[in-house]
Image (tube, rainbow, N blue to C red):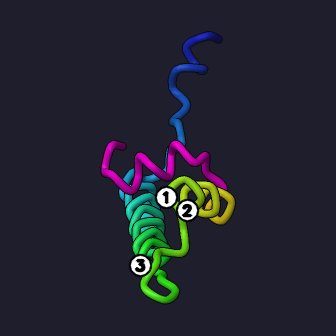
Amino acid sequence: MQQALFDTPTVTKPAHKIRNTTALLYKRVREEHQKMMATEYKGCKMYNPDFVYIKLGEKFFKSPKTIENIVFNRC
């Protein structure tokens, strides 16, 4: 009876879909980061880097530290 438990195939998701989705997320985070950091008003930057990490974290449902790691390719 226990032998039947080991014979059942396991269903897993293909790894390439997870990688593509993650790569797309990272690309979008980096694009948004560049866009926010380049925003200026009368020659002065509008956003502090810490503020940008917090706002992007809220937008993409990640922690500010995770956003920072994505931006600097530390993941």
Q: Between residue 25 and residue 12, name the one nearer to us.
A: 25
Q: What residue occupies the far top of the structure in this picture?
A: 2
Residue 34 on image: x %, y %: 40, 73
In the picture as drawn, the residue positioned furthest to the left comes out as 73
Read off the residue under disc 3: 38
Q: Given the image, on which type of amino acid does mark 1 rest?
A: Pro
Residue 12's place in the image compared with 16, above or below, is above
**Mark 3–mark 2 CB contact (< 8 Å):** no
Q: Amino acid at mark 3?
A: Ala
Query: Circle 1 is placed at which residue position?
Result: 49
- Give the residue at x 39% y 51%: 15
On screen, residue 3 above or below 43? above
Mark 1–mark 3 CB contact (< 8 Å)? no
Label 1 crowd (10 A; few <14 / some 14-19 / many >=20)? few
- CA separation, marks 3 and 2? 11 Å
Q: Find the distance from the CA under tag 1 to the CA under tag 3.
A: 11 Å
Q: Which residue is mark 2?
A: 52
Name the amino acid, label 2: Val
